[in-house]
Image (spheres, coloured by chain):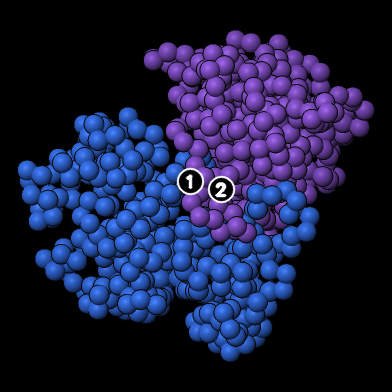
Chain colours: A blue, B purple
Amino acid sequence: MAEPILEVKDLVKHYPLSQGILFKKQVGAVKAVDGISFDLAKGETLGIVGESGCGKSTLAKVLMNLERATSGQVLFKGEDISKLSGQALKAVRRNIQMVFQDPYTSLNPRMTVGDIIGEPYEIHPEVAPKGDRRKAVQDLLDVVGLNPEYINRYPHQFSGGQRQRIGIARGLALKPEIIICDEPVSALDVSVQAQVINLLEQLQSEFELSYMFIAHDLSIVRHISDRVGVMYLGKMVEIGTDEQIYDNATHPYTQALLSAVPVPDPTARENRERIILSGDIPSPANPPSGCRFRTRCWKAEDRCAEEIPLLAVPSVLEGPAAHESACHFAEVRESAAA
Amino acid sequence: MTTAVDSTRSKRDAPYEGPLLDVRDLHVEFVTRDGVAKAVNGVDYSVRAGETLAVLGESGSGKSVTAQAIMGILDMPPARIPRGEIRFRGRDMLKMGKEERRKIRGQEIAMIFQDALSSLNPVLSVGFQLGEMFRAHQGASRKEARDKAVELMDRVRIPAAKQRVNDYPHQFSGGMRQRIMIAMALALEPDLIIADEPTTALDVTVQAQVMDLLAELQAEYNMGLILITHDLGVVADVADKIAVMYAGRIVETAPVHELYARPAHPYTRGLLDSIPRLDQKGQELYAIKGLPPNLLRIPKGCAFNPRCPRAQDRCRAEVPELYPVTEDDGAPLAGRGSACFFWKETLHDR
């Protein structure tokens, strides 16, 4: 793998739970992100999947430094950015930008498209001097496939797909090296999703961007990602290349998740073995001891309650299927879910 | 379930020939400040007992408005139904009085909404809301209603139903709330259930649980089910037949296997091609160009023509009707129709 542009080491984000009005005392913590490590290489797309409440959006916020990490490190080109503040933080933020889920609420309805896309230049004037900004914004509109003449329009004059393009243009404005996409297409219609996905891929090869692509739609993640990480209750349970995850998943949670994805092919419905998980995801304020998935896992034994499985390559795996999985009983499922 | 709804039971057991629900040439419009938005422009579909019809379409295709018209829960005005029939067991519901329709709603046709949290009343316990069905429709006492609520919660597999019957909606998870919605729809053992995006707000693992439950209950009670969704994956899993909607019209109907194997409308084809599949890591995704139309200004001719790779002059001038789709030798394909002048070419284009 190429030199990593972003290294995340044992990242933790706990939100304290306090009790009492006058004398507040901490009674616990919501463990939203609880010890996550991974690397992101230049030009690579890392997909992050998991159900709601698994901490994937919190992870994005901590990487952006919108939330302070409780502990752990985020190294951008070798420099720890998780503790930066002031000017130093501002300088680093230029390189990591974000595209949000909901194109309806993430754009200010009272600003024109030109102002929205050009606003990053107010904060980082060094990227585009004042006189050039209008031109720069028009170029960006062109890059994301919108008519540059639309620069004076307002967000409500655009459809959902077009708004998401505006959001992407804003993310590109500062010429970042990393873009974190948090569910960028889940609010869009099926026929428009494909357009936006194609745009993201085209921009990646044009500008050598690294993406962290957070989504709950596993088929879209597979389509766009080079590597995929699966999160459950604040932990990374499995990470590997897309083939390793989708064809050779070894963690029971990943297997269940994959088997639950509805396949758009009616011939598959008779001969598909679905794993139906029972119950709901436990509260991150009070996660189960040992392996966090054990309360819903069909393989769980006493050992799972006592010993936390570490994210490592299990010794039973060999060859191209070998990848990191946090399970005591990791193995590739026979008749893997298509 | 041995609830005391024997009156509806005996009625259901009486054989009824023909479809449960038969929608014919339904039109729905909304009067807005900017003009008349034609949300539904001549929809025909029918559902039999025990059958699952999936209505597939993107936002603005009119799939939910059709369902609301069937339920009789459209706000009129601004909505109006200038033409059409909605026949339930052969009787046109649009010609019925308010009181008569109210009796059908809930008892014979029930609806499951997408967002369970906003469909449940946050200040009443779920037991009260479930029991309300029995008190309003069957004059049950509070005690009886509560017992039946527990029974229903058991039925949709909510753990510890007895202890949880007095809990409020916010105390349940998303999947559990959707089960409560299903329980509420099932309460009076309706003949037909309309589920409008029942699992869209849920995670995939929970979605699988909920869809399985719905399918199982449907089979048990031999109910008709109209499943409204935009998710081609969910449709493939549960539907018997499919109606694809675009700009307020049905553009293609087909049994589920045939639709996926051989679509006969360019829009269906485009939708199928544009989904990334787990089992096929693709190169560039096929994308349907352009955007769904504005309902205030539906394009002339075939509404899909500005986005269609096959569009000819004829498509821009004439509105195609839903043509029956046949094999090359003219052998009919049961249940298949396509509103495209070039369905034959599309069918073979694989």
Q: Is residue A316 above or below residue B272?
A: below
The amino acid pointed to by label 2 is: Ile
The amino acid pointed to by label 1 is: Ala
Give the Cα separation between the discs numbered 2 and 1.
7 Å
Contact between marks 2 and 1 (CB within 8 A): the answer is yes
Q: Residue A101, image x and y in percent?
A: 39, 49
Asked if one can make out residue B113 in the rendered structure from this viewpoint, the answer is no
User: Helix, strand, or loop for circle 1?
Assistant: helix
Q: Nearer the viewer, residue B345 or A278?
A: B345
Q: Residue at x 48, y 26 (%)?
A: B306
Q: Residue B17, image x and y in percent?
A: 90, 24
Q: Nearer the viewer, residue B102 or B211?
A: B211
Labelled disc at residue B349: none
Q: Is residue B11 above or below residue A108?
A: above
Q: Nearer the viewer, residue A132 or A297?
A: A132
Position of the C terminus of chain B by quadrant:
top right
Left or right: A292 as drawn, with respect to B163: left
Mark 2, residue position: B275
Labelled disc at residue A194: 1
What is the total number of numbered labels drawn onto the structure image?
2
> Mark 1 falls within which chain?
A
Left or right: A106 as drawn, with respect to A192: left
> Mark 2 falls within which chain?
B
